[in-house]
Image (cartoon, rainbow, N blue to C red):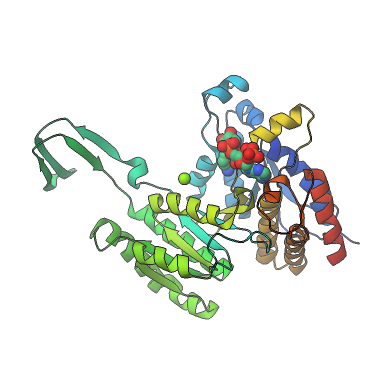
Amino acid sequence: MEKIKMLNPIVEMDGDEMTRILWKMIKEELLEPFVELNCEYYDLGLPHRDETNDKVTFDAGEAIKKHHVGVKCATITPNAQRVEEYKLHEMWKSPNGTIRAILDGTVFRAPILVKNVSPAVKSWKAPITIARHAYGDVYKGTEYRVPSEGKAELVFTTNEGEIFRETIYDFECAGVLQGLYNKDSSIISFAKSCFEYALSTKQDLWFSTKDTISKKYDQTFKLIFQDIFEKEYKEKFDKAGIEYFYTLIDDAVARVIRSEGGFIWACKNYDGDVMSDMVSTAFGSLAMMTSVLVSPDGNFEYEAAHGTVTRHYYRYLKGEETSTNPIATIFAWTGALRKRGELDSTPDLVNFADKLEAACIDTIESGIVTKDLALLAEGETTSVNSADFLKAIRANLEKSL
Ligand code: NAP
Ligand code: MG
């Protein structure tokens, strides 16, 4: 069979620990035999980030801006223990945070569904994708533990002087106080990323806040979304046959539970943090969650939602057999290859991505699974190690190609 060609490169970002081992195995077993990979390679493994004073992470972010598509392996976000373990020069920042800042993007997380792992919510038949606004609000808040009676005020000052002052509360006893902010520019990017991703995946977009209570703060989110939708996206949505709708967060929660899934749910920062854990747990497993960072100007970076699976890596280093689930990492690759194919109008590449995903799902549904899924899946299963699991996927893929 002749290998499938790629007209333009994707940005490949290697990573750490067990996922780095899987990364190489996936390329050798499932990609290189079939596709003439055209990748611009960046090694975001912690040792190389340290050697380059983290420049490699910034370069990778810029490269995604240039080529519009990237695929990333999970990476270690160093803490004090990692600084010691890897003898680092510095406690480098999270690569995901750095790349998100460069691309100004929003993260979309979606579960991969298989028939033999049923969601905890019986009505869910298709994935629910959570879009979380990863900027501001309580994550950048200023807090104060009010020690005694006294007056709390909200004050705003420009270069010309004070233009706003309002009493928050006249404390008659001790209490707590919190100041939050967000920026129009960030909300606009969030909105555009959501509309772009909905068009790209042809799914309805829901957005929810608590604007009935938060009449200026949450209302601003609602109005910015509405304004951008009407000016820039309404026609495109009509043409694509998809819908945007806004509803109160409490109504959204009730509708989500009663829904069949198959849509994107955009959430403010805190709501997205909490709801994405709820939705992923209800769908089954972190090892089956994909994640894509979408920038408002249409750059896409795909990855698995899980980390580097450190515990399995230490076992691997001792020479023990490991059964780590590679599915979310494979789907990061298929996501990137499909997007590359769509942007370059190369249907062979899109078709390959579809077939590889189908081969993964067929393998699991036939009962061949990694250990994590053996505990979750219904019916007869055989738990195999990562290498044998990839071989089984390859056999299914070869049958379909
Ligand atoms: P993790 O790597 O997601 O693993 C947590 C546990 O979840 C594992 O020990 C394993 O449970 C299970 N698990 C996760 N993915 C799995 C898979 N593919 N197959 C089978 N089981 C899987 O999270 P962590 O241990 O908290 O973090 C490890 C490192 O990853 C940290 O250094 C962190 O900074 C980094 N991290 C990176 C990203 C990213 O790059 N996007 C995201 C999160 C964390 P059992 O051990 O019980 O089998
Ligand atoms: Mg969380």
Q: Horizontally, is 162 left or right of 99 in the view?
A: left
Q: Is residue 58 visible?
A: no
Q: Is residue 266 visible?
A: yes
Q: Please, is residue 302 above or below residue 146 in the view?
A: below
Q: Quadrant of the N terminus?
A: bottom right
Q: Horizontally, is 285 left or right of 312 in the view?
A: left
Q: Horizontally, is 228 left or right of 357 in the view?
A: left
Residue 117 % position (x, y): 65, 59
Residue occupying the far front of the picture: 379
Q: Please, is residue 312 above or below residue 154 in the view?
A: above
Q: Residue at x 32, y 50 (%)?
A: 182
The quadrant holding residue 393 is bottom right
Q: Quadrant of the C terminus?
A: bottom right
Residue 145 % position (x, y): 22, 33
In this rendered view, identify the residue nearer to me: 162 or 146.
146
Q: Residue at x 76, y 62 (%)?
A: 362
Q: Residue at x 67, y 66 (%)?
A: 342
Residue occupying the far right of the picture: 1
Q: Please, is residue 193 above or below residue 21 in the view?
A: below
Q: Residue at x 61, y 53 (%)?
A: 290
